[in-house]
Amino acid sequence: MFDLSGKRVLVTASTEGIGRGVAEAFSYHGATVVVSSRSSKKVTDTLTRLRKVNPSVYGIEADLTDLKSLDILWEYVIEVIGGIDVLVLNSGNPPREPVTFSEATLDDWEYSLKLYLLGPIKLLSLALPKMVEQRWGRILFLSSWTVKQPQSIFVLADVSRAPLIQLAKILSRDYGKYNITSNVILMGSFQTEGAKRTLSRLAERMGVPFETVWKERVLDPIPLGRTGDPKEDLGSLLLFLASEYGSYITGSTLLLDGGNTSCVD
């Protein structure tokens, strides 16, 4: 359905879980993809996996919380593919989550703000001039449904991610004239290793089995009765937004949560 041949895509935090599923979707549909991760081994493993489908996949070690690391990432992108058409801003979870406000330290907040807000801003400052020059671009922020319906145990992520909604709206207005769109995806629950690690820590704190927490906190609230698939569910939406089919959608905040979010505004 989608042909992304010729499009250059950078997906951050993309060597496992949601990010890797998105990278797989874009590479499967012909895009040239750059993946990144804090783990060089995971980068190598992901390249081996994705290049079986599409040889035009590249990767480099990079850390969203280290702004100098992002300079190196961008230099690599320019060197290997000359720039990008699509920027997918994904991130992992703060290592301390789940954590409440009373439990979080200033160090936790600093890390979270770098991960979710300052890192993406840094990459945008590098990528946008090229998008303006080429008069085409897609910016896709991957966030969470809990930004719309905050959860006390995810205070770091929910507060640090919330400004991205305003940023996406501002970018949509300022850069629409250059055929650059900017949207936020509020993701629901996906059965990834990162999600399992976070819920395992919560289960340990509560003194109950992981399976109980997963069922009660993740599966039961979802009307569709299942978690999302990073490649098929999320990947398909991002492919649509990155293609010409989605060229009139910008400044939007889109829920992809299986009906989990109860609020309507």
Image (cartoon, rainbow, N blue to C red):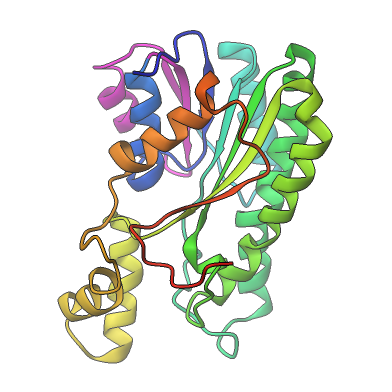
Q: Residue at x 46, y 29 (%)?
A: 240
> Is 182 one of the magenta-colored residues?
no
212 lies left or right of 50: left
Q: Residue at x 61, y 35 (%)?
A: 249
Write the start and end of the magenta stretch as one range: 30-59
The image position of residue 153, as x and y in percent, is 47, 80
* Depth check, front residue: 231 or 110: 231
Specify the farthest residue to the right.
174
Specify the farthest residue to the top.
6
Q: Residue at x 79, y 45 (%)?
A: 170
> Is 50 one of the magenta-colored residues?
yes
The image position of residue 260, as x and y in percent, is 37, 66
Quadrant the C terminus occupies: bottom right
Quadrant the N terminus occupies: top left
Specify the farthest residue to the front.
264
The image position of residue 29, as x and y in percent, is 36, 18
The image position of residue 179, as x and y in percent, is 72, 22
In the image, residue 191 sits, relative to residue 252, either above or below, namely below
* Depth check, front residue: 39 or 64: 64
